[in-house]
Structures are given as C-alpha cells and as structure tokens.
Amino acid sequence: MDSHKIVIIGAGFGGLRVALELAKRNARLKAFEVTLIDPRPEHLYTPLLYEVSSGDLELSSDACVGELQSGVCVRYDAFVNIVKKRHIRFVRGSVKTVDAAAQSVTLASGETVPYDDLVVAVGVETATYGIPGVAEHAMPMKTLEDAFAIRERAFGFVRAYKDGKEKHLSILVVGGGANGTEFAAETANFFHRLIAEGTLLHSDCDISLVEAGPDILSMFSASVRNRARERLRALGINVLAATKLKSVEAGAVMLESADGTTARHETDVVVWTAGIKALDVVRTWGLPVDERGFINVTPTFLAEGTKNVYAIGDCASFAHPKTKKRVPALAQAAVKEAGIVAENIARTLERKLPVSWTPPERWITVVPMGGAYAIADFGWFHLTGTLGYLVRKAADLQYFLSILPFKEAWKLWSSGARVYRKND
C-alpha cells in the first residue's frame, strides 16, 4: 500500500500541531507520512519574544544569545529525533509554487514534494500600511532576529550611557496590542531596575506607546484595559491612544492626534508592532483568498472549492458564525484548529463526514506587564499581578509539554524561566 502523503507548509503553532495530531492518529491513518516544510530551522515560541528583546540588557548579545534563545525555541532537526515520531520528517525550505492539479508543491530550491492532502499554515508577515519610513527606520518584532536587533540597540544605549557617551534614550513603541504592550512594560521594568540601582536617572529615559485606535488592548474587556493602563502609568510609560503614526525618519517621528494636530517627536528607537498582513506569495498559489490575501476556508478548514487543501492559523480567513469577527491571531486558536484538521484528514480516509469548528466568543488570554506582573483574562473574571504572572508561566509550560516529552519540555521551560526572571 502506498503511503498517504500529507504536506504541511509552515511549522509554527498550527503546522507543528497538525503533524503531532496526525501522529496520534497513526492507527486510523495506517500507512502515511507527514512532511513539514518551513524556511526557519527552529520552532519559535513567539509569546516570549518580548523577553528576548528586553532580557539581560546589561550584557552583549554575544555573551547571552545562547541563553536567551534556549528558552524560546527548539531546532526542528533535533525536534523530530526528540519526539520520535517516525511518520514526520522536516524539510527546510520556502515553498515557491503550489500545483493543485499535480498535487505537489515546489520549493525555491527546485525540489518538488507531492501530496495527497495539503495543509497551509504559513502565518503572516509584518504590515507597514505604506507609512513613509517604517520599513527603513522602524524595528519590527516578528522573528528571533528582530528581537535580538531591538535588544542590541537597547544594549548599545546602556553601554554608551555608562561610558558617558549617551545622555538620554527615548523609545517609541507603535501598536497597543499585546505585543507592543508587553514589550513596552518589560523594557520599562528593566529601566526601573537600573534606576533603583543608581545606574540610570529617571529623567534620562522615556518610553511611549502609540495606538491608532481609541484604546490599547482593543480585544480585551474594559476592565482589563483599565488595569493595563494603570500598570503602564505606574511604570512611567506615556500612552498615546487615538494617535496615528504619519512618518518615521532617523531620530524622529511625525504623530497625528485625534484632533488632527500633527507634531514631530524626537525618538532614538521606534519599535513597530502595529500590524500584520497575508504573505504576498500565497496569492500566487491559486488558492481562494479574500481581498486582503487571507485564504477563505469552510468551517472544516478546507480551502473553499478544494477537496484536499486545508488552511489554518493567521493565514486563514475564518469568521465566527455568530459575531462574524475574524478569529484572532492567537497561538491557542491555531492549536485548536490543528486538531480539527488532523481529525478531518483521518475522517476523510475513513469515509466519514468531517467535523466543523465553532470558536469561542472569548479567549482566555494573559498579558505580561513587566516583571512578575501579568493580567490573566478568563472572560468572567481576571487575575492580576503575581497570580496573573504565575498563570502565564503555567501556560508556557503547558504548551511545551504539549509538543515535547516531559524532560525536554521542562528543560526548555526552566531554561527560559531562569534567564528571563533576571528582569522580574
């Protein structure tokens, strides 16, 4: 019997989980093989990127890059051996074309990989919305390289300040979602530690958080947003809501307030966390996409009009049947979707009807707010401070346990906890 070939493009939260969920169903799938394709060599736990970008800022990247990286990612070549799933193989590469008629994908290297079922889980990329200067002068925080670049810039200031070569640092974070809020809070917490130690004067640094919408953390309840604003205020962060970034240049930005007033603000570092967009290459694959380039899917996650192509995670356009709102770009959403796709692939082989997914109207989310402080939102109640922080740490460990054996998961989690708590 020929093996049933399942190709997964993208090995992030959704893609990796599809592979693992399929491996759990090996008795039902029988003869099958999973090929996991990703251009990166490691699986990155992106919720901790803010820790990498703000961790151990008193040390050079050369001195601690290994430590910082060890708590957020695991290499795929080692991963396949660790989990010992004989049905899964990893191929490092970028997919150039998808041929639905031939049921194959072609990599940029020229290699062709055939499939019987295809799962697209490629995620998204940073959107600049055409704002002048963002691509040239702002620093995104999407990849491990981005986080280290931001960290190196901040480290350069700390080093120059101690040597008397720098007098003041101004950081402007654009985007009041979870990523921007977490980074601003963690960086401010680090500067507070330097101030307490007498290394830095309070007047010599400032952090601003700019949000174009009426308030930060728009996907959260009003009570969570209020708590977050209080915490940011206590950390000395200047929150500029209803403020649009008009342009970025070296050392300054132009901001437009709600009343239409435009003003120039000098700043040393601009961190961009404001938007995402569909990957341009997806439009060339011949899949059904919406006006923004996201793949249109059915409630079973089949790409509309196809019989064996699925799409999940941030790259898929999946609206809640009641609220009509797009499912948020959350790791936990991608993980839930992955289980549905794996089940439906198995059901198709068993000639059973597929299952549909109805996402929750509210998600349990945790927003770290600098140091041992976080806000955990459970919908009908929330925990703040140390309790929220412990919920976040538990959630991190739970994820690592879901993809790795206990020993390896504990090693990854404890390594990160040991390094990152230096700023807590």
Image (cartoon, rainbow, N blue to C red):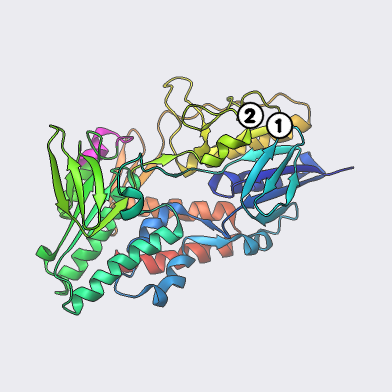
Image quarter in which the N terminus is found: top right
Tell me the element at label 1: loop
Q: Quadrant of residue 323?
A: top left
In the displayed structure, would residue 407 be above or below residue 111?
below
- Residue span colored magenta: 218-226
Mark 2 in CB contact with mark 1 (< 8 angstroms): yes
Q: Which residue is mark 2?
A: 302
Quote the CA–CA distance across marks 2 and 1: 7 Å
Local packing at callout 1 (Cα closer than 10 Å; few below 14, some 14-19, many 20+) is: some
In this view, which residue lies farthest toward the right? 1
In the displayed structure, would residue 48 be above or below residue 32?
below
Q: Earlier in the sequence, mark 2 or mark 1?
A: 2
Q: Which mark is residue 136?
A: none
Who is closer to the viewer here, 422 or 54? 54
In the displayed structure, would residue 384 be above or below residue 226?
below
Q: Which residue is mark 1?
A: 308
Question: Residue 245, image x and y in percent?
Answer: 24, 42
